[in-house]
Image (spheres, rainbow, N blue to C red):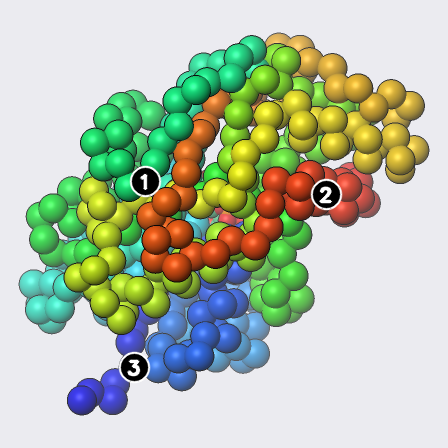
Amino acid sequence: MSTSKTPIFLTGATGYIGGAVLARLLSHPSANTFDITVIVRSPEKAKILKEKFDVNAIVGTHAELDKIESLVENSHVVFHLADADDEPLIQAILNGLRKRHSKVGDLPILIHTSGTGVLTDNARGEYATDTIYSDINVDQIKSIPPTAVHRNVDLRVVDADEKGFARTHIVLPSTIYGIASHPLVKAGVSNPHSQQIPGIIRASLDRKRAGVVGKGLAWWPSVHIDDIAELYIVLFDNIISDPDKTGHGWEGFYFGENGEHHWIDISRAVGKAMVELGLTDNAEPTSFTAEELAKYWGSEEAGWFSGTNSRCRADRGRALGWKPKYTTQDMLASVKPELEALAKKQ
Ligand SMILES: NC(=O)c1ccc[n+]([C@@H]2O[C@H](COP(=O)([O-])OP(=O)(O)OC[C@H]3O[C@@H](n4cnc5c(N)ncnc54)[C@H](OP(=O)(O)O)[C@@H]3O)[C@@H](O)[C@H]2O)c1
């Protein structure tokens, strides 16, 4: 049996998802069999990763496609955790996997990050949908239009699996929540904050009143940062121990959710927390105006994202043994500490 370590390449080590997954790989029972390489923009963070965590941290950006391609070529497993939408970046990763397959002869593994944004509609907060996607319903997953959010990248990933030069797996997190508190956050390397709920909170703090897109009637799922990081690890462990039994390609979509909410529930939690902290005197959310959507999300259309429906069931991950612990109640309870932390930074 070979005693060489498994070469792993990971993007997004300084990010919210990437940091949480890297922290788990570093404390994995088989961590001493991993040879982990990451690419980060900050030379200071690269130094901490090398000196404190024994991670081979390369300084570089995602625009350095040749560098990415060769780092991937040297890796048996790639965790792409930084960006669900960068087409040149995923192409460089896939080129590296193809080269590895033809030169080394192994079947490299890609664990890519997409998101349940791929399921969104144009509800603008005005209605709830009945359509619920299951990741074990392959025909339903195939029916998602190529124009959907993240889909341009996801389709390239599946294509690589079909061509046979890599085994590909796509994790699709929903609204991830919770302030990450693992050792990489404590060392100042990784971002502790998510995106969607902090987006609503920052806008609400700025306008001094909780805001909501439309009536907030649409549905979204959520998942705690520790649970989604665990899903990546459960998937990875299954791939390593029994690759043939672990769904890949079209059978390799893994939603990350443990319960769902209406958008108005988040905005009400924001309003309640703002009143409790003396930041407003009225807890009831009001609809964001078109101008506010543009101000806080860059454009009115971008702001509508927080009024879309996205409904799914994480059946495939649960079948692999994933057992998320945190529920929608925990998500709502996470709003106040998130708001307190973000209010201090404003
Ligand atoms: N958070 C969620 O709820 C959620 C849910 C579903 C899907 N997603 C998707 O998952 C992906 C990661 O999300 P996240 O929340 O972890 O974001 P994040 O905390 O902002 O992390 C992004 C990571 O990418 C790195 N990065 C970005 N541009 C780069 C570049 N040009 N060169 C090198 N590194 C670069 C960042 O490095 P720096 O530290 O140098 O900036 C950081 O490590 C995104 O595509 C997001 O849409 C997120």
Q: Are marks 3 and 1 in contact (CB under 8 Å)?
A: no
The CB of the residue at mark 1 lies under 8 Å from ligand 1: no
Residue 235: x %, y % from top left: 35, 59
Residue 320 visible to the viewer: yes
User: Any mark on residue 135, and which?
Assistant: 1
Q: Is the CB of mark 3 within 8 Å of ligand 1?
A: no
Q: Answer with the quarter of the image where residue 48 lies.
A: bottom right
Q: Is residue 281 above or below residue 166?
A: above
Considering the numbered disc 2 on the image, is that residue within a helix, a strand or a loop? Answer: helix
Where residue 346 appears, x then y in whole percent?
78, 39
At label 2, counting other C-alpha atoms closer than 10 Å, the crowd grade (few under 14, some 14-19, many 20 or more) is: some
At numbered mark 1, what does the secondary structure look like: helix, strand or loop? Answer: loop
Judge whether 22 appears above or below 218 on screen: below
> To which residue does mark 3 refer?
5
Residue at the spot 76% in from the left edge and 46% down from the top edge: 337
The one nearer the camera, 99 or 321, is: 321
State how far apart marks 1 and 2 are (Cα). Answer: 28 Å
Q: Position of residue 200 (x, y in %)?
A: 66, 30
Q: Which residue is mark 2?
A: 333
Task: Give the amino acid type for the residue marked by disc 1 in the picture.
Answer: Asp
Mark 1 vs mark 2: which is more N-terminal? Answer: 1
Q: Amino acid at mark 3?
A: Lys
